[in-house]
Image (cartoon, rainbow, N blue to C red):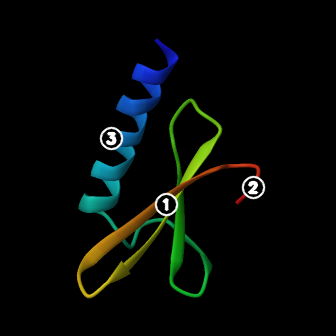
Amino acid sequence: MVCKQLNLGFKSTVQLIAEHAQAWTMIKHNIRRILVRRFPYGVLYSVVNDEDLYTCRHALES
C-alpha cells in the first residue's frame, strides 16, 4: 500500500515539474528540488535543452 501511494505521489510530482519546471527552489547550479507530498523524499531535477532530467533522493540527504 505504501509503495502504491509513493508511486502516485512521485507521478503527481513529476507532473507538477512538467507543468511548472521553473517554479521550485534552485539548490545548486541548475538543479532544483521539489518534495514528494506526504513522503520524506525529494525529486531533484534539471532542465536541459527543453528536456527534464530527474533523480529521486531521500529529503534528508538532499
Pointer 1 with pointer 3, Cβ within 8 A: no
Spatial CA distance of label 3 from label 2 is: 21 Å
The x and y percentages for residue 20 are 31, 63
Q: Which residue type carries mark 2?
A: Glu
When the figure is inspected, residue 5 is found, relative to residue 14, above or below; the finding is: above
Q: Residue at x 41, y 34 (%)?
A: 9
When the figure is inspected, residue 38 is found, relative to residue 43, above or below; the finding is: above
Q: Which residue is drawn at 46% across and 29% down?
A: 6
Q: Name the residue under label 1.
A: 55
Q: Name the residue under label 3.
A: 11
Q: Mark 2 points at which residue?
A: 61
Pointer 3 with pointer 2, Cβ within 8 A: no
- Left or right side of 55 for 47: left
Whichever of callouts 1 and 3 sits on the residue coming sooner in the sequence is 3
- Left or right side of 31 for 19: left
Q: Which residue type carries mark 3?
A: Lys
Label 3 sits on a secondary structure element that is helix
